[in-house]
Amino acid sequence: MKISYCLTRYIYLAAIILLAGCATYPPLQTPSGRPEVSIHGAAMKDIINVIVDQMSKDGWRVKSLQDNRVVVVSSNDKWEMMLAYGSPLNEIPENQITFTLVYAGENEVRVLCSGVIVTNPGGGFENVAYIVGGKFYARAQAELEKLKLKMEK
């Protein structure tokens, strides 16, 4: 039986996508192995203000703001994310990033970052998928390093 040309192309495309999905990023060189920085000489309130300002400029909405925690959200309407995380109740999942700030010593604030993808946000059937490693960790760490440089000037 002969396989059609179009079917062969789809098989190759699926193989390429699967292999590309296996690409890994090196682990972060932080104490926890997750995105984090320690900022010296800046007040926690000032750091939170800069995080809120920068994330708002990048199109994120503030969902929760506390003395030591900021949660920002953004709808994710990319077709890949809708296919993987969408549901019949709500096709568009929501990205959620949490910044947690803790005092780490004399005049030092540690900023930790974590991310989740929320299916059916705000509904009774809300489901959370944690983002661990990969591209998210690399981008989050790079953004936290920029924050550190800005705050320690």
Image (cartoon, grey):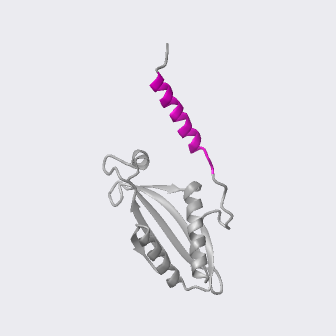
**Is 15 colored magenta in this rendering?**
yes
Q: Position of residue 53 (x, y in %)?
A: 44, 76
Residue shown at 60%/76% (left/top)?
148
Q: Position of residue 141 (x, y in %)?
A: 59, 65
Residue shown at 53%/73% (left/top)?
100
Q: Quadrant of residue 94?
A: bottom left
User: What are the residue bounds of the magenta stretch?
Assistant: 5-24
Q: Is residue 71 visible in the rendered structure shown here?
A: yes
Residue shown at 67%/66% (left/top)?
30
For this view, does 119 lie left or right of residue 97?
A: left
The number of discs equals: 0
Quadrant of the image for the C terminus?
Answer: bottom right
Front residue of 88/74: it is: 74
Q: Position of residue 55 (x, y in %)?
A: 45, 70
**Is 8 colored magenta in this rendering?**
yes
Front residue of 20/43: it is: 20
For this view, does 95 lie left or right of residue 139?
A: left
For this view, does 86 lie left or right of residue 24?
A: left
- In the current view of this chain or complex, which residue is farthest to the left? 89
**Relative to 116, is 5 above or below?**
above
Q: Position of residue 27 (x, y in %)?
A: 66, 57
Q: Is residue 110 visible in the rendered structure shown here?
A: no
- In the current view of this chain or complex, which residue is farthest to the top? 1
State the predominant SS element of the stretch in magenta: helix
Residue shown at 59%/60% (left/top)?
138
